[in-house]
Structures are given as structure tokens and as C-alpha cells.
């Protein structure tokens, strides 16, 4: 079927570009206008890379999760794969998803399996997703495997969103605390300077310190802001380097409370991936290799790199983990039990569940300590500023008497 590239404006006013397949330019134009697009340009073109050109960026995690959920439901209802994809195309409300699904349908109609059709989009879906789909095709239970994949993606999303949501309030509180202190020093304290102008050394030490701090903020606040922004940019660039990211990951693991949370969060991802893949017939070596790539912390990832050679040589995973001297006894013991009982997949999923619970409770404990600490610190600094001003006023009154 001929492909046409287009440029258009959506209902929200955003400029879109992509490709559409139709039997003719007129039909392509009708198809795009039916989606509420105002065409700027339409010409014959290739369908390659349509999923990314449709909006300038690929679909997000939420779109992938929704697509997987709907595909699992349709396959479970008995629809053939090609018809299920057609239904998803009709249901797609985003141009990039429609382009991606159209490309998948074209590949499936050409005789490719779903996993083979997804191969060009491995960077978008990930090797874990592709191997899960491939295992479902081999076993003949693609809908059941997609259900497990949906469960995995939902659990990962829930854990990630819960951690991010839990950190939003402390972040807002920290910003409010910093702004409150800056406003007090930059705008409130200077209002009293004229009152204290002739006092000199007669002012209490605390009052003189607060006034000096206010003068610094008033005179050099812009420079301080520039230094903070420059430090933030430098830190971001440094953290983007391999050495910087590795150093940052090591420091995160060494933090008193957050280090344990980061460790359990990363190990939970690894264990969940291994358990899910093993439970769907993927080989142990491949499951471990894929799971290692899901770990973001470089220190933990480097420690896990001992596992593929150990599996190749027939060595036990638990023994290899113990030799790294990095993993906790719970990780080692549960892995050993899984190996000895022949149910490593179940034990890995159980380990992931245990660590997920630990992460949730750890985040709650950390926030229970952090929030009062931020409030008390902000209150203490503001109280010191107020006390310093009051002490200065009392000194003026004493001199007047």
C-alpha cells in the first residue's frame, strides 16, 4: 500500500509530521482530516520510522502499557493477532501510536511474528519485552504471557511512581524553606536597617550577623544565584559522564538510610525480571543478561556482571553473589533456596516482592524523618532572624531610655 508523508496541525495547535498508508492521496487526506488534523503538506513518502516521525518523539511508557493491556484482552477474547492490531489502530488516539501499530500490522501481514515485528523498536520496548513476547509465541500462550507482562509493567510503574510521588512533598517543602529564608533576609531584614544604622557595635552580635547576611543577599544575591545555577549545570554534566555517574551511584549506596533503599530497589528490579523471564521459559543465562541491563546503579550492575560467566561455567548463582561481598544474606539465601529447590523463578519473584515492601516502608520512614527535619530547620532559622531583630529593637529602646 502506498505511503504518504504529511505535515499537519492538531486540534491542540501542535505541529505534527509523519506518514500514513492509503490507496491514494485523496484517501490519505480524508484519513488524516478524520483525525482532526489540518493538513499543511501531503506528498508521497516512505513509511520507515513512522512511529517516531508522527510527533517527533516515540510513545511513552504509559502508551506502551495501555497497548499491551488492550492487546492481551483482545487476544484472550479469541481475536487473531492481525485483527487485534487493526482494532488497536482504530482505538489509537495518538498519531505516534497509530503509526507504530500500523507498522506492526504491516510486518505481521508480511509473515513476521510479533516479536520479529517489534525488533526494529527494541530501543523503545526493551529486550525484556521482546523476549517475553518471543517466549509467548514459542509456548503458544501469547495472551497469557502478555498478561504477565502487563502485571510486570504495572508493578514497575507503581513502584517508580510511588517513590517519585513520595519525594514531591519534601522537594516542595525544601523550595519553600529556601525561598522563605531568602525573602526574610533579602526583603524583611533590610526594612529595619535604617533603625539600626547608628547603633554600630552597640547592636547585639546576633543582630549584626543577621544584618550582614541580609546585606550580602541584597548585594550579591544575583551572584549567589548564578553560582548555584552554574554548580547545578556542572553537577549535571559531571553526573552524565561514566566516572561521575559511577561516583554518584557509589555515594548513594553509602548514604545511611537512602543507600539501603536504593540497593533494595535495584535488586528488586533485577530479581523481578529474572523471575518473570524464567517463568516464561527464557534460559537462565539470557534472563540474567537481560535483567542486569535493567539495573541503573552502576556499582550493583558491575557486581552482577559476575553471574553470566558463573552460569556458563556451571557455578551456582548464590555462591557467585556471596563472593562479591555486596549482597545481603537474604538475597544469597533466597537465591540458594531457589537453586536447590528448582524454583528459582518463584524465589526471585518472592525476593522482589519482599524488597518492594522494604522500599515502600523505607521511603515512608525516610519521609517521616525528613519532613519534620526540614520544617524544624526552616522554623529555627526564621526564629533566629526574628529574635535577632527583636534584640536589636530592644537595644535601641534601651539606648533611648
Image (cartoon, grey):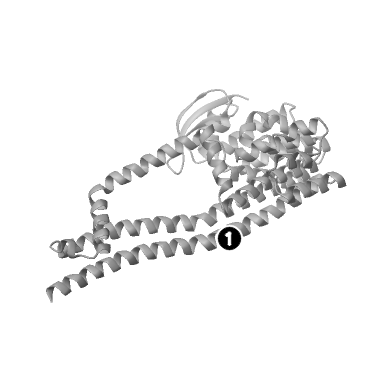
Quarter of the image with the N terminus is top right
**Figure check: 244 above or below 175:** above
| Left or right of 185 on screen, residue 314 | right
* Nearer to the camera, 395 or 347: 395
Quarter of the image with the C terminus is bottom left
The image shows residue 79 at horizontal and vertical percentages of 76, 42
Instruction: Give neighbour class at mark 1: few <14, some 14-19, many 20+ (Cα, 10 Å).
Output: some
| Left or right of 115 on screen, residue 6 | left
Residue 175 in which image quadrant: bottom left
Q: At 46% from the left edge and 54% from the top edge, which residue is drawn?
A: 171
Residue 354 in sight in this render: yes
| Number of numbered discs on residues | 1
Q: At 60% from the left edge and 41% from the top edge, which residue is drawn?
A: 297
**Figure check: 400 above or below 324:** below
The image shows residue 72 at horizontal and vertical percentages of 72, 45
* Nearer to the camera, 63 or 110: 63
The image shows residue 134 at horizontal and vertical percentages of 76, 34
* Secondary element at tag 1: helix
Residue receiving disc 1: 364
| Left or right of 95 on screen, residue 146 | right
Residue 301 in which image quadrant: top right
The image shows residue 263 at horizontal and vertical percentages of 63, 47
**Figure check: 130 above or below 171:** above
* Nearer to the camera, 130 or 335: 335
Residue 342 in sight in this render: no
Amino acid at each position: 500500500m502506498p505511503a504518504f508523508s504529511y505535515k499537519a496541525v492538531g486540534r491542540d495547535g501542535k505541529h505534527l509530521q509523519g506518514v500514513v498508508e492509503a490507496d491514494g492521496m485523496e484517501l490519505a487526506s480524508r484519513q488524516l482530516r478524520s483525525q482532526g488534523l489540518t493538513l499543511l503538506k501531503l506528498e508521497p513518502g516512505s513509511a520507515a520510522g513512522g512511529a517516531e516521525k508522527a510527533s517527533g518523539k516515540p510513545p511513552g511508557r504509559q502508551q506502551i502499557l495501555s497497548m499491551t493491556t488492550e492487546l492481551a484482552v483482545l487476544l484472550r477474547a479469541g481475536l487473531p493477532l492481525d485483527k487485534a492490531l487493526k482494532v488497536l489502530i482504530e482505538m489509537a488516539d495518538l498519531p505516534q501510536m497509530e503509526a507504530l501499530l500500523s507498522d506492526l500490522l504491516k510486518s505481521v501481514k508480511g509473515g513476521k511474528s510479533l516479536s520479529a515485528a517489534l525488533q526494529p523498536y527494541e530501543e523503545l520496548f526493551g529486550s525484556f519485552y521482546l523476549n517475553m513476547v518471543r517466549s509467548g509465541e514459542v509456548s503458544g500462550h501469547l495472551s497469557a504471557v502478555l498478561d504477565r507482562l502487563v502485571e510486570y509493567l504495572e508493578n514497575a510503574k507503581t513502584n517508580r511512581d510511588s517513590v517519585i510521588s513520595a519525594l514531591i512533598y519534601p522537594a516542595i517543602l525544601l523550595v519553600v524553606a529556601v525561598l522563605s529564608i531568602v525573602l526574610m533576609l533579602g526583603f524583611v531584614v533590610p526594612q529595619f536597617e535604617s533603625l539600626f544604622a547608628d547603633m554600630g557595635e552597640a547592636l547585639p552580635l546576633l543582630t549584626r550577623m543577621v544584618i550582614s547576611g541580609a546585606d550580602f543577599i541584597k548585594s550579591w544575591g544575583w551572584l549567589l544565584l548564578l553560582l548555584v545555577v552554574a554548580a547545578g549545570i556542572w553537577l549535571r554534566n559531571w553526573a552524565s559522564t561514566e566516572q561521575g555517574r559511577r561516583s554518584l551511584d557509589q555515594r548513594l549506596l553509602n548514604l545511611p538510610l537512602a543507600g539501603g533503599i536504593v540497593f533494595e530497589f535495584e535488586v528488586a528490579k533485577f530479581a523481578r525480571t529474572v523471575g518473570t523471564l524464567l517463568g516464561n521459559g527464557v534460559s537462565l543465562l539470557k534472563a540474567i543478561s537481560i535483567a542486569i541491563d535493567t539495573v541503573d546503579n552502576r556499582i550493583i550492575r558491575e557486581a552482577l556482571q559476575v553471574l553470566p560467566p558463573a552460569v556458563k561455567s556451571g557455578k551456582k548463582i548464590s555462591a557467585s553473589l556471596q563472593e562479591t561481598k555486596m549482597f545481603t544474606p537474604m538475597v544469597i539465601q533466597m537465591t540458594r533456596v531457589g537453586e536447590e529447590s528448582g524454583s528459582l523463578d518463584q524465589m526471585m519473584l518472592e525476593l522482589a516482592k519482599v524488597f518492594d515492601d522494604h522500599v515502600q516502608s523505607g521511603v515512608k520512614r525516610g519521609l517521616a524523618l525528613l519532613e519534620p527535619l526540614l520544617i524544624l530547620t526552616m522554623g529555627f532559622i526564621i526564629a533566629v532572624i526574628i529574635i535577632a531583630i527583636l534584640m536589636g529593637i530592644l537595644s535601641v529602646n534601651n539606648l533611648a531610655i
